[in-house]
Image (cartoon, grey):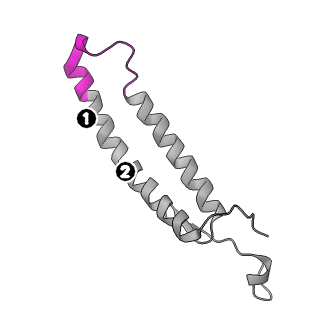
């Protein structure tokens, strides 16, 4: 039995794709930010957390995509499809 979460599967798949696109941008952004902070030297505020914030965003997006794919039929995360079907959709003999 699947869990009802009130999500439109197409919208959830689109969101998973968008989160994946953002994840691909984090690494180049981290490199640019790190270079900019190094270049700024003392002009950069000492309280700036720089790339640590981007790491947290990446972790959040990865976890959110995994959870969303688990909840939505046929959602795809990192090339692994998660198939969830209601009991009524299963064919006889399927687990």
Q: Answer few, some or many: residues within 10 Å of disc 2's Cα (few below 14, many 20 plus, some between 14 and 19).
A: few
Q: Work out which quarter of the rendered image holds the N terminus and state it.
A: bottom right
Q: Residue at x 55, y 63 (%)?
A: 12
Name the residue at 64% across, 71% down: 83
At horizontal 27% and vertical 16% (from top left) the residue drawn is: 44
**Extent of the magenta region:** 35-50
- In the image, residue 54 sits, relative to residue 7, either above or below, namely above
Instruction: Residue 66 in the image: state x and y as whole percent.
Output: 58, 54
Q: Is residue 38 magenta?
A: yes
Helix, strand or loop at label 1? It is: helix
Quadrant showing the C terminus:
bottom right
Q: Position of residue 9 (x, y in %)?
A: 58, 69
The part of the image, by quadrant, that contains residue 6 is bottom right
Residue 28 vs residue 74: left or right? left
Q: Position of residue 50 (x, y in %)?
A: 37, 26
- Numbered circles on residues, count: 2
Disc 1: CA contacts within 10 A as few (<14), some (14-19) or many (>=20):
few
Q: Position of residue 70 (x, y in %)?
A: 64, 61
Residue shown at the point (47%, 39%) measured from the top left: 57
Residue 5 or 72: which is nearer the viewer?
5
Q: Quadrant of residue 8?
A: bottom right
The label shown at residue 24 is: 2
Compared across the picture, whether 45 is left or right of 63 comes to: left
Q: Which residue is mark 1?
A: 32
C-alpha gap between disc 2 and disc 1: 14 Å
Secondary element at tag 2: helix
In front of the other: 17 or 4: 4
């Amino acid at each position: 039995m699947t869990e009802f979460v009130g999500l439109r599967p197409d919208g959830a798949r689109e969101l998973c794709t968008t989160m994946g696109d953002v994840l691909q941008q984090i690494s180049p952004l981290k490199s640019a930010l790190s270079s900019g902070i190094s270049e700024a030297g003392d002009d950069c505020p000492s309280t700036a957390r720089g790339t640590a914030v981007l790491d947290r965003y990446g972790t959040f997006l990865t976890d959110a995509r995994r959870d969303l794919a688990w909840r939505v039929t046929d959602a795809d995360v990192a090339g692994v499809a998660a198939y969830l079907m209601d009991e009524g959709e299963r064919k006889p003999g399927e687990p």
